[in-house]
Image (cartoon, grey):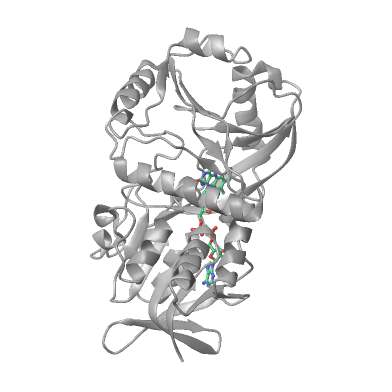
Amino acid sequence: MVRDAVVIGAGLPGLLAAWRLAQGGQDVVVLERRTVASESSALAAGHVPQESTSPHNLAVLRRTRAIVDELDRATGGVVRFREVGGLQLAVGSEGAEALAARAAQAAGPGAAGEFLTPDDVALRWPDLFCGDLAGGYYTAGDGFVRSLNLAAVLGAVARQAGAEIWEGCPAERIRIAGSGRAAGVEIGDGSVAARRVLVAAGAWSAPLLARSGIALPTKSFILQAVILVGNRGRLPFMSELEAGHYVMPRAPGALLLGLPPTDIDVDVEGFSRNPDPEAVDRWLRLLRRRAPILENAAVAGGWAGALTATPDAWPLVGRFGPEGLYVATGFGGGGVQRVAAAEAVAQLMMDEQPFYDIGAQEASRFDGYGGEPFEFREGPFYYGEAPGAQLW
Ligand SMILES: Cc1cc2nc3c(=O)[nH]c(=O)nc-3n(C[C@H](O)[C@H](O)[C@H](O)COP(=O)(O)OP(=O)(O)OC[C@H]3O[C@@H](n4cnc5c(N)ncnc54)[C@H](O)[C@@H]3O)c2cc1C
């Protein structure tokens, strides 16, 4: 039996693609080595901005929001998009200039935030220490979605639409036919034949493809998060441009503190899933300086997940390598907000027009990649676009 498509990895992009493929009448099976959303897709802060300086990125962010809203209506609120706004703070003049430039640039695609002086920030958020600030940037429409709920619902609707999800079924390697075309996936003591193969195995995509003789230009890294409980005043979603950490209000009396990337090139088969207490302590001290109201907030738990970065900080979506092979990975710390890109991959796999112009972002831009080293670059996930950085 030859399937229309096999998807490797039941994280957010794999599940969304499988759902859309099944809805499109495709015979699709998802291979998941553990259980649905057993890695980073369950661990995200779930930040989904609704503003970008890039029209392509904006189309994806808005589509993600639309998908969340669609599933929200279908499930009675299981995956609700919670608007919490987004504030980014800069302490250096270069950072403030970048935020001001961003306000001007984002006005083009039509969803600009506003540049704020330190006095504006102090007036609006009296719980923040603003003595060291050079500027701020605020967008009202940003929010978050609980990524674990989103993944669970995507798994359910994918199954409902007819997709099979085989948990506990690791893909060993891609099967390449004599013609050079991807023809299926080898698993344990057998294989699944398919006309098209989608690799959406997060940080494990590169090792899987390497076993298949295909080099994928990604670097692994770790993101950590902890939950803080205690009085959190009226803090918005807030990130620090230079230091790189962020906080997300999650519930009354609870905040998620997200740490910047660590452990570049980490071994994805052997990393700690617990946050590093020393690092947490360090970032918590910085956060308390910014928000003294958190002085008595306590760490109630936390986690760490493996992610992938790409040479140009754009995701890897669409065709890659041999005919019949597709990827949806390389999302870095932004795979929730940009999960809709996987819908575009499913559309490509069904020979349909993707909902946005993915041309320049297609993974095939790296078809000639032969394993050359490259610098780690984090993408524009919480407005961390450095001045002059290439934008998605
Ligand atoms: C602390 C933290 C905070 C984050 N915050 C945000 C945020 O605010 N906003 C945002 O947009 N994103 C955020 N992210 C990023 C987001 O979680 C990821 O970009 C996204 O979940 C990546 O999804 P994925 O499916 O590519 O990878 P994963 O979720 O890691 O899924 C990969 C799946 O593939 C499976 N797999 C691996 N190898 C194989 C194999 N050989 N065969 C079969 N299955 C296999 C794994 O078991 C896993 O289920 C955050 C991540 C972390 C860790």
Question: Along the line of sight, which residue is nearer the eye, 286 or 70?
Answer: 70
Left or right: 323 in relation to 72: left
For image coordinates 55% across by 75% down, the residue present is 162
Q: Position of residue 146 (x, y in %)?
A: 62, 47
Q: Quadrant of the C terminus?
A: top left
**Residue 196 appears in the picture as rendered:** yes
For image coordinates 43% across by 52% down, the residue present is 331
Q: How many badges with numbers are in the image?
A: 0
For image coordinates 58% across by 47% down, the residue present is 44
Q: Position of residue 32 (x, y in %)?
A: 57, 71
Residue 216, relative to residue 388: is it above or below? below
Residue 329, relative to residue 131: is it above or below? below
Residue 274, relative to residue 216: is it above or below? above
**Residue 217 appears in the picture as rendered:** no
Q: Position of residue 360 (x, y in %)?
A: 24, 53
Question: Along the line of sight, which residue is nearer the eye, 135 or 108?
Answer: 108
Q: Residue furthest bottom?
A: 1
Quadrant in which residue 122 is drawn: top right
For image coordinates 33% across by 63% down, the residue present is 318
Question: Along the line of sight, which residue is nearer the eye, 105 or 127?
Answer: 105
Left or right: 211 in relation to 151: left
Left or right: 298 in relation to 281: right
Q: Position of residue 363 (x, y in %)?
A: 31, 60
Quadrant in which residue 96 is drawn: top left
Left or right: 179 in relation to 238: left
